[in-house]
């Protein structure tokens, strides 16, 4: 049984890379970013000290290495410090800042994804499984909560809690989990109305048993798709909040924070301070979206060729079959006449 499940997982991964090369590229990019986040201390040319990245004000706003003159390049080589992507207005190495900023983004993505998924699964499954007045009250609360603009709500909560990594995770995870609970509830309700769940109810199964034994395993693909699909939005939200001044603590490397505090003030004199973190954000969002879309296509049976598929080739095949039957029927009727 275990070998069968392992082969099934390997088949899904193989199918993902074979049929969805863009999703495979997204997985590879995300995996590289995770490795950069884990080994940031070994990869960064300048190491963090006491939670901040040290800088030398003498070397502030140094251009990227390939934009320097030969004399300036020789001077950097002689000093033993090469700023490949330049420095900011505090003399900090931009490359090291971006590497440590990847760690911040990966931690936020993982933290927000796990907490948001847990909240949405708990609310959605309880609401669908218990039903009745409980479902009615919970869904009206969710409706009222989703009416509030997400960015406005995040700014209000950040004003109350203050800036920091933990506060940022809470601000992004809780509203996202409540909003996604409606999708989980819809999937759970379709499972709840199935025959085997009704049979377990007749046998006296408890609510928790039905949730864990029947509902959760059958909605797991939807849960994974929802979690993966929200990665790109998490990066964009983090960058947006940092841009508005509601983000990580001062001194913590962050791509959005760099655009706000370094790039915006030096947009014309040092445009690379906006360009490089902007490229990092765009690449991570694109990779997360490609991964989420590809995972949905592989795990959703309607998108991979099962019953009720959306595959255009299968639709054309069915249409051709019925068209031939219709033409053959008309031909037989003509001959008989």
Image: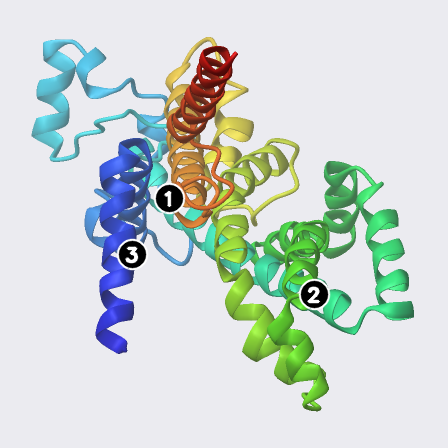
Q: Nearer the viewer, residue 139 or 337?
A: 337
Asked whether residue 159 appears in the rendered view, the answer is yes
Name the quadrant of the N terminus.
bottom left
Q: Is residue 124 left or right of residue 324?
A: right
The residue under the point 40% across, 15% down is 270
Mark sitting earlier along the chain (2/1): 1
Q: Residue furthest bottom?
A: 204
Q: Which class describes the residues within 10 Å of circle 3: few (<14), some (14-19), or many (20+)?
A: some
- For the residue labelled by badge 1, is the local secondary structure a helix, a strand or a loop? helix
Q: Residue 259, percent across and down?
A: 50, 27
In the displayed structure, 171 sits above or below 196; it is above
Which mark lies nearer to you, 2 or 1? 2
Q: Residue 274, percent across and down?
A: 45, 21
Residue that mark 3 sits on: 38
Q: Residue 298, percent across and down?
A: 38, 45
* Image quadrant where residue 151 sits: top right
Residue that mark 2 sits on: 193
Mark sitting earlier along the chain (1/3): 3
What's the CA distance linking mark 2 and mark 1? 44 Å
């Amino acid at each position: 049984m275990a070998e069968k499940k392992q082969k099934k997982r390997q088949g899904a991964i193989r199918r993902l890379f074979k049929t969805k090369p863009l999703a495979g590229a997204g997985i590879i990019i995300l995996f590289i970013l995770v490795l950069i986040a884990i080994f940031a201390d070994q990869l960064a040319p300048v190491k963090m000290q006491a939670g901040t990245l040290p800088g030398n004000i003498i070397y502030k706003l140094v251009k990227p290495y390939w934009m320097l003159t030969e004399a300036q390049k020789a001077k950097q080589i002689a000093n033993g410090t090469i700023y490949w992507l330049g420095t900011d207005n505090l003399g900090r190495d931009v490359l090291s800042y971006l590497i440590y900023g990847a760690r911040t983004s990966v931690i936020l993505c993982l933290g927000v994804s796990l907490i948001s998924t847990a909240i949405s699964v708990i609310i959605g499954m309880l609401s669908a499984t218990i039903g009745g007045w409980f479902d009615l009250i919970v869904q009206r609360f969710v409706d009222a909560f989703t009416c509030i603009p997400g960015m406005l709500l995040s700014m209000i909560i950040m004003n109350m809690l203050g800036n920091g990594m933990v506060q940022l995770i809470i601000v992004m995870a809780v509203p996202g989990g409540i909003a996604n609970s409606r999708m989980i509830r819809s999937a759970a309700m379709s499972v709840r109305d199935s025959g085997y769940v009704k049979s377990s109810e007749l046998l006296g199964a408890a609510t928790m048993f039905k949730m864990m034994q029947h509902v959760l395993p059958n909605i797991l693909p939807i849960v994974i798709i929802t979690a993966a699909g929200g990665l790109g939005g998490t990066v964009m939200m983090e960058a947006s909040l940092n841009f508005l001044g509601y983000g990580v603590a001062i001194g913590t490397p962050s791509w959005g924070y760099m655009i706000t505090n370094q790039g915006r003030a030096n947009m014309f004199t040092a445009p690379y301070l906006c360009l490089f973190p902007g490229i990092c954000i765009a690449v991570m969002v694109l990779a997360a979206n490609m991964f989420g879309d590809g995972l949905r296509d592989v795990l959703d049976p309607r998108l991979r060729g099962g019953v009720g598929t959306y595959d255009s080739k299968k639709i054309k095949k069915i249409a051709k079959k019925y068209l031939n039957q219709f033409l053959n029927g008309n031909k037989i009727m003509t001959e008989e006449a």
